Amino acid sequence: MTEQRGRRGAVEAIGRALFVAVLAAFFLNLFAAIATVIVNSFARTWFGGWFPDGLVTRWYGYADSEFGMVDVLRFTLVVTLAVAFLACLFGVPAAYVLARARFRGKRALVLLYLLPMLMPPFTYGIPLASLLYRAQLAGTLPGVILINLVPALPFVILVMTPFIEQLDPNLESAGRMLGASPWALFRRVLLPLLVPGVLTAALLVVVRTMGLFELTFLVSGADSQTLVVALYSAIFGAGIRPAQAVDAMAVVYMGTTLAILVVALRFVSPTQMVFRVRG
Amino acid sequence: MTFRRGVLLSAPAVLFLVAAFVYPFAYGIVLSFTPKSGGPLANFTVFLGDEFQRAAIGNTFALAVPAALICVGLAVPLAYRMRRGIRGERALTALLVVPVTLGPVFIADAMLFYFGPVGWFNRVVEALHLTSEPVRLIHTYSAVLLAIVLTAFPFAFLLLLGYISGIDPVLERAAHVLGAGPWVTFRRVLIPLMAPGIATSFALTFVLAFGVFPSAVLLGEPGGSTRVLAIAAYQAAYEKFDFSAGSAIALLMGVLQLGTIGLVFAVRARLYSGARGGKG
């Protein structure tokens, strides 16, 4: 009996050690790699050695003048906010219907909302980009917003449907019984209940759109790049410009993304960040 | 809700998706079968007939299948250990969201220097006298695989954690009372209950890995072992300006991805059916 318990204790200890080791290796390498980027963005030069030979801040100015970083940042914020706004504007009413109504053909509707998330982005992105080029929308702000809205809208619908399902429908019935018009019902009952969910969904869309590379890449031109696309182009063209300037842009990208992430994590749990918002 | 109001409320989303997803998708299918030259199937026969082009299919699966297996293989035991919660769980899960949020482009940039010949990784390896020469990691197949795992593992893990913490702990105790050891309980009780979660997280990480583009270009050998379907599609459309061939390759990509996901769920349904315990 004691021997068995001893063996089980040993197995448990090995299991715990492996658990810690795997996670430690994962995070150690991840954060060391991120630290490399930050240190290098402040390096005067860094050819060899453990650390660079002197720290400067000039690469940030260089990144701005060479890559137009401030303009790119402004463009990125406009795109992400517009995508989040439009995705919520179109998506929340659609989610309301899915959550509250029963009708024939509901499964077909759900399939329509799910398909963009099941397809590889290139499968619809390349023909869509080709159409946008023909309509001369590629390389413009509306074109970039439009292509980013394709995955964002289904995401909002999927996130908001369970959120609306858990709102008590009796509140709406009560409002109706007390003589509220549909508009007053929406304005005074539904909207206040929806606001927290909608804000969360909007934040999640902003985080996702910031990092979404493929679709923007297919339609962006020289002056219609989001940060992540500009970063890709800078890395791709490495050798032309100093690596430090590329990393300066990477740090700006990281700072912006993580700042929004921190705000988002105040409202949702990390698991919800990746999947869906539950009530 | 009246039917009319339902239609009105759904209309903006439905119209947008029909115009910006269904129509381009259908247009892509038509475009694929109307090549620049040759019969309707020319895009596909040319692609499949050329050994260099055809290799992209194998290259994509060679990255996506191991990546999904590694992610799920690591996530199942880790989630199992955390099934009843651990200290600092929220902090741990928040940290795991960081690589997901930063995305493959940033991760590629960070890995290029860190795992490069003069990066910290090779400095440590050298200082510990583990190898005589720097480990060649970047611009290899392994670097791309590693990059995918870094960004896809958190998805698999967080999804499985949701499933396993939704399993009633009473079931485990019942198995114990009936004389099952931890391994038998894991194998015969928890794994079947987690099967839907395992299949879903495999499919999810597979999808993430299957569409790999930036890391395959930046960290791999885009002209060789990591020339994946996304690169082939992109090159056809944007370097040879043949949107028809590009759409055909992208369509092939979509069909292969959906086919694989279908297969995963079919296998899941055959192996484990019946009661489900996980939430989700």
Image: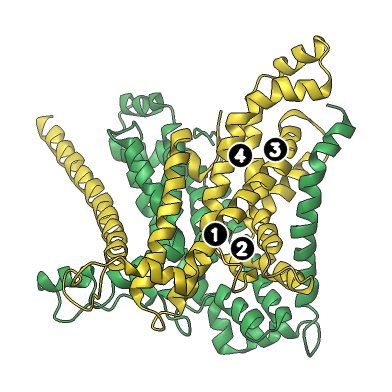
Residue type (three-letter) at the residue carrying disc 4: Val
Check disc 2 and report the residue beneath it: A120
> In which chain is the residue bearing label 1?
B
Q: Can residue B184 be seen in this view?
A: no
Check disc 4 and report the residue beneath it: A159
Q: Which of marks 3 and 2 is nearer the N terminus?
A: 3
Q: Nearer the viewer, mark 3 or mark 2?
A: 3
Check disc 1 and report the residue beneath it: B207
Colour in which chain B is drawn? green
Q: How crowded is mark 2: few (under 14 residues within 10 Å), some or many (20 or more)?
A: many
> In which chain is the residue bearing label 3?
A
Residue B118: percent from left, percent from top: 22, 76
CA gap between label 1 and label 4 equals 20 Å
> In which chain is the residue bearing label 2?
A
Q: Quadrant of residue A239?
A: bottom left
Q: Nearer the viewer, mark 1 or mark 4?
A: 4
- The relative height of residue B22 versus residue B236 in the rendered view (above or below) is above
- For the C terminus of chain B, the image quarter is top right
Marks 1 & 2, CB-CB < 8 Å contact:
yes
| SS for dot 2 | loop
| Residue name at image x 26 percent, y 64 percent | A39
Residue A186: percent from left, percent from top: 75, 25
Check disc 3 and report the residue beneath it: A92
Q: Nearer the viewer, mark 2 or mark 4?
A: 4
Marks 2 & 4, CB-CB < 8 Å contact:
no
Q: Which of marks 3 and 4 is nearer the N terminus?
A: 3
